[in-house]
Image: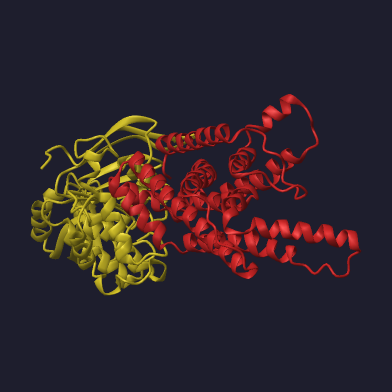
Amino acid sequence: MNQAPPVETRGLTKRYGSVTAVENLNLTVRRGEVYGFLGPNGAGKTTTLRMLLGLVRPTAGTARVLGEEPGSAASLEGVGALVESPAFYPYLSGRDNLRMMARYAGVGRERVEEALRTVELSERAKDRFKKYSLGMKQRLGVAAALLKDPELLILDEPTNGLDPKGMADMRELIKRLGRGERTVLLSSHLLGEVEQVCDRVGVIRGGRLVAEGTVAELRERTGLLVRAEPLREAAEIARRISGVEEVEVTDGLLRLSTDPDRAAEINRKLVSAGLEVSELRPAERSLEEVFLELTGEEGTV
Amino acid sequence: MLASLSAELLKLRKRPATWVLALVWLAVVLVFGYLFFYLISSFPTGGLPEDQRAQQEALGEQLRRGLLPENLLENLFVNGTFGTGGAIALILGALAAGSEYGWGTLKTALTQRPGRLAFLLGKMLALAVFLLLFVLLGLAAGAAGSYAVALLEDAAVKWPPLEDFARAVGMGFLILAVWAYLGFALATLFRGTALAIGLGLAWSLAVESTLTLLPVENDAYETFRSFLLGENTASLGSYFGSAPQGFGVPEPLVEPERAAATLAAYTVVFVVVAALSFRGRDVT
């Protein structure tokens, strides 16, 4: 197996005339992880994925996919992709569509049946694609991406348009596919999806990567939340503790702006002042708050 | 590339539009190549004055003779049946290349690793296979039509020599191919079928026909006309004979050999244009 990072871009840029779709993007996806590529609609996610697949040529910068030139036979050999909406030949059955894709991919018919089983579409495989529901179309798209049993799976908004049950099923499928050594690059504008499925997240806005890290890192701990009685007295005492910059009372809790690692010390001081402390935990921003802050968007959650 | 060819053959074989066009082609050969001429040649002449009646009957006799099996190739190639087939081939070529853009299937296929040029070559070769089938279908339909006329007229059934059939297959393929790959190249350039079919048909049916019928007698204009697709299609067909007088079919402008070379050159140009356009452009 190739030891290069599955995806690595440096200064990747794509301009369409005066419009910059992707700007100076530096992205590294690590082997075996499920990487969430998060951003609002029009942020440049799909253009980036198209560049990684060789469908679109970058204006500047470089990209390597499995250590190879994007779109080259060597890189595509290990990559399976579902880009935007699943697109197949409407007059062919699901199975015939996959058989055709298998011919392009140079894999045998047994892979078609295996991919159909994986996405649980075997029973409807003989129906024409145009008769499929959106959920079935998405699953067929994932099946096509799995034909080569790829090292790297690129999925672009795979839950788009699905009902809640379909979304939950698709997330389960992605989690299952991401187990083991396979790397998954999942593009999405759905925070919940990324939070549930991904190991690391890159947030893109206006074609630029504005943040990257694990979900926990992105949510970052910003202080301490304390439940203590009596609350007003607890707030007075907390304000006198050195290193506590700000104290807010919200929803029956004190929010202290301080280093969360001082939890034990603060607990001791409150208890020794005769207060009853029933809860003390790090305060974290929700991923939605992070997203809104980074992208300035009304987040889809 | 063989894998792409096999995928494209499956695609064309299972596509309803391919068979609809095949049926249209069959109808064109039988209706406009035989039924139409047979009916007008058999109109009753009883109400006409004596001199006109004799003239009409002679003309009808000439027409019916032209429909017999011995004149099969002349009828199909000289009277413009295969030229009309060119318009059908143009639609087939445009659909083969352009539908991928409409359905968005290029991204699905190309990410499977066929390679852009192999993908395109496979598509072009599969189209060539179907064009060959269309040629054979046209000849078979023509043979059936001429055989039916021979039965109706109680005439002897005498077929053209085999080598002429072989030439007809090659010539028919060249005529259909040049139009099909024009449609293919236009669909690739415009990334869709509608504009490609519209422009292609407008060029073949309106622009070229008008240019051919313009009453300009000038060497430079004739040279220009000698490079038109329709003129070369008609000139190639003239290998099997000349059109009967009085049917409005223009005289061939160039020798059949030169017409064949010109059509082959155009076919290569259309293939190269499609390949260059497809190879370098973003798939969005």
Quadrant for the N terminus of chain B in the image: top left
Q: Pinpoint residue B178: horizontal percent, then vertical percent.
A: 53, 42
Q: Pinpoint residue B162: horizontal percent, then vertical percent.
A: 46, 49
Indicate whether B201 appears above or below A63: below
Tell me the residue at 26%/75% (across/down). Answer: A123
Q: Which chain is yellow?
A: A
Q: Which color scheme did the rendering employ for the protein? A: by chain
Does the image show residue B112? no
Q: Pinpoint residue A6: horizontal percent, then vertical percent.
A: 19, 42
Indicate whether B50 appears above or below B280: below
Tell me the residue at 68%/64% (across/down). Answer: B38
Q: Report the front residue among B218 and A9.
A: B218
Indicate whether A169 appears above or below A85: below
Q: Quadrant of residue A111?
A: bottom left
Q: Residue furthest right?
A: B49
Q: Residue furthest top?
A: B220
Q: Quadrant of residue A66?
A: top left
Give left or right: position of B268 versus A148. Answer: right
Does the image show residue A179? yes
Q: Which chain is red?
A: B
Indicate whether B275 appears above or below A157: above
Tell me the residue at 32%/63% (across/down). Answer: A96
Give left or right: position of A106 versus B239. Answer: left
Tell me the residue at 31%/52% (across/down). Answer: B6
Q: Report the front residue among A228 and A223.
A: A223
Q: Report the front residue among A54 and B2.
A: B2
Quadrant for the C terminus of chain B in the image: top left
Give left or right: position of A232 versus A294. Answer: left
Q: Pinpoint residue A215: horizontal percent, then vertical percent.
A: 22, 52
